[in-house]
């Protein structure tokens, strides 16, 4: 039996008892009022337990629904009439009908052609099924926290980790954003109250393999959020370098030693006299490089040469170098004179300026915003760049000293810096390493991978659908995919036969193992509480974009007469119960006396 029926029966028994006591009382004065007050008190008491509802007629559009999503402000939807729906969650103070599966719900209600969406919006999976619907989106306010973030998931050991993004501080107090890695605080930035601020952190990971850094939001002594930044640091590839020197100098001497110490395969040739050379082979097998040919250049990823040696070699050797660069080999040339030594190097513009007064050269990597320590160098030669050139290294005033240009499938780099070894002499080994790692990586031959894997979404979470999209070099048999030893069944893309797709629903957070054709590719699964502000912001953006595209749709509307239920406020019954009980007490204590 339902509780409300039990309450009604008990109230009826109580009322019968009270009426019997009033009628059997010897003093018959004010009997009618006492009976009315007894009935009123018991009735109001019962109605406090059993709610009273009534129906009112209302007109509702059967072609549209009001859909409430996470982030909905209850006050903003309180005055909206009609039935409200939500996706498998409740909103405090707002009565909604729960929808477990939106595509299924819309498929079973074909009359619906318009959705009024409130809150953060819908996931990409739900948005896919809304083509052809008119959508009116009423977004919630920007969520507080990190609303955008980007970093490299995989980097080489010689590269820097760049973490960039935007923090939205919706509070009235400042927030400190801290980058932490391997137990050490790396860098921090402060965000003023009620403001948005971009942030950018750079660091050089010192370990090889998997790591998880953290972006921590702090306010006073409270930790607002700890967002994980997983990354994989890999060993630098075995970049094969060929150096052709017209004369021995300190720049080549120190570069040769640095390449050897860092395990680069190196072939080094120094001109002694006309057609006589001295050759060294470090970390690699020896070969004949007295004459440069197309076949010998195929064995190297980067050629480092000075302008004098480029002018001294035979024309057919310059032709072989030019063809090798077009085929993908990297080319790095040192210049030291204002006048070009050959037509080959004359394609690069240059100009001279007087040396700076302090005789110190300040350099920085243009794209990475990395500033080197000062070089004790009187630099007077600079490079002219065109729209086809990309400046890589500039001085403090923005003048270019290293630039890059594309030629076919390769890159040609030119530099007017002659003495980077001064960094080593002054103990700035990190700057020397950073410089040569950057320029050699920018010039190196790009290796074509046989396969690539894309993981969707950006932040795969526990129990959420995770998709693996595998691109193979050639279309053929299906790739073998395994996650944590469990084999997956990929499906082939009909339009792109070299693309295969498989789905996975992770159950544990942290690092998981993905194997593609026996090639290990670890990936990270986030907790559902990670990066909430960013996910909510992305949901707002995705829903807004779809709403803007769908606004041109014109939909038919039809109204239907409907009834909505409302509940009588319990304050009316509480007031009646207090008044009736007060009269009965006053009558029995005061008037009867």
Image: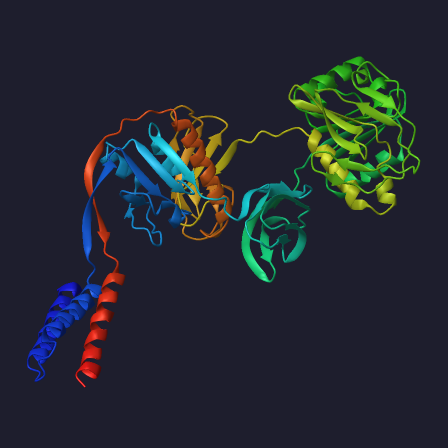
Instruction: Return the residue nearer the eye: 148 or 19.
Output: 19
Q: Residue 399: where, in percent of width, then height?
A: 80, 29
Q: Quadrant of the N terminus?
A: bottom left
Q: Tell me which colouring the rendered structure shows.
A: rainbow
Residue at 84 percent across and 26 percent down: it is 382
Residue 390 seen in the figure: yes
Instruction: Return the residue nearer the eye: 264 or 424.
Output: 424
Residue at 23 percent across and 36 percent down: it is 108
Q: Quadrant of the C terminus?
A: bottom left
Q: Residue 446: where, in percent of width, then height?
A: 63, 29
Q: Residue 219: where, in percent of width, then height?
A: 59, 57
Vertical arrangement, residue 539 with respect to residue 403, above or below = below
Place residue 569 in its image quadrant: bottom left
Instruction: Return the residue nearer the eye: 424 or 576.
Output: 576
Place residue 36 in its image quadrant: bottom left
Place residue 13 in its image quadrant: bottom left
**Residue 427 horizontal side relative to residue 143, left or right:** right
Instruction: Return the residue nearer the eye: 202 or 232.
Output: 202
């Amino acid at each position: 039996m339902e509780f409300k029926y039990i309450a009604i029966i008990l109230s009826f028994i109580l009322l019968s008892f009270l009426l019997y006591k009033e009628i059997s009382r010897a003093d018959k004065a004010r009997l009618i009022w006492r009976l009315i007050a007894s009935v009123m008190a018991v009735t109001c008491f019962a109605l406090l337990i059993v709610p009273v509802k009534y129906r009112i007629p209302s007109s509702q559009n059967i072609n549209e629904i009001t859909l409430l999503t996470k982030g909905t402000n209850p006050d903003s939807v309180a005055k909206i009439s009609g039935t409200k729906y939500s996706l498998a969650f409740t909103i405090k103070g707002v009565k909604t009908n729960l929808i477990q599966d939106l595509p299924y719900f819309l498929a079973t209600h074909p009359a619906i052609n318009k959705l009024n969406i409130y809150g953060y919006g819908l996931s990409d999976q739900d948005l896919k099924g809304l083509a052809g619907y008119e959508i009116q989106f009423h977004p919630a306010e920007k969520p507080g926290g990190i609303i955008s973030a980007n970093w490299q998931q995989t980097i080489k050991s010689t590269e820097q980790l760049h973490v960039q993004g935007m923090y939205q501080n919706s509070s009235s107090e400042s927030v400190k954003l801290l980058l932490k890695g391997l137990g050490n605080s790396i860098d921090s930035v402060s965000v003023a109250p009620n403001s948005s601020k971009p942030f950018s952190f750079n660091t050089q990971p010192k370990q090889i393999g998997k790591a998880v850094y953290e972006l921590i939001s702090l306010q006073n002594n409270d930790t607002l959020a700890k967002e994980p930044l997983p990354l994989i640091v890999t060993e630098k590839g075995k970049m094969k370098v060929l150096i052709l020197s017209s004369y021995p100098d300190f720049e080549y001497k120190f570069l040769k030693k640095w390449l050897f110490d860092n395990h680069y395969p190196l072939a080094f040739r120094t001109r002694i006299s006309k057609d006589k050379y001295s050759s060294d082979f470090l970390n690699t097998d020896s070969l004949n490089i007295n004459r440069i040919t197309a076949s010998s250049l195929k064995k190297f990823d980067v050629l480092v040469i000075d302008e004098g040696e480029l002018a001294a070699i035979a024309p057919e050797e310059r032709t072989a170098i030019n063809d090798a660069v077009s085929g993908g080999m990297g080319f790095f040339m040192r210049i030291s004179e204002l006048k070009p030594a050959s037509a080959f190097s004359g394609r690069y513009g240059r100009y001279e300026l007087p040396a700076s007064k302090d005789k110190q050269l300040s350099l920085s990597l243009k794209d990475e915003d990395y500033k080197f320590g000062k070089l004790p160098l009187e630099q007077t030669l600079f490079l002219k760049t065109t729209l086809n050139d990309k400046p890589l290294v500039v001085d403090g005033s923005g003048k270019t000293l290293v630039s890059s240009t594309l030629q076919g499938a390769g890159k040609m780099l030119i530099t007017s810096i002659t003495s980077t070894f001064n960094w080593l002499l002054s103990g700035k080994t990190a700057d020397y390493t950073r410089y040569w790692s950057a320029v050699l990586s920018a010039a190196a031959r790009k290796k074509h991978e046989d396969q690539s894997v894309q993981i969707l979404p950006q932040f795969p979470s526990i129990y959420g659908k995770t998709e693996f999209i595998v691109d193979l070099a050639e279309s053929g048999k299906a790739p073998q995919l395994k996650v944590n030893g469990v084999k997956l069944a990929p499906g082939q893309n009909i339009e792109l036969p070299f693309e295969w797709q498989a789905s996975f629903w992770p159950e544990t957070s942290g690092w998981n193992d993905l194997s593609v054709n026996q090639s290990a590719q670890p990936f990270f699964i986030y907790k559902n509480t990670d990066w909430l502000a960013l996910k909510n912001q992305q949901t707002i953006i995705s829903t807004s974009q779809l709403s803007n595209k769908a606004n041109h749709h014109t939909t038919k509307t039809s109204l239907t007469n409907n009834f909505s239920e409302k509940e009588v406020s319990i304050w009316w019954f509480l007031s009646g119960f207090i008044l009736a009980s007060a009269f009965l007490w006053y009558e029995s204590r005061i008037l009867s006396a």
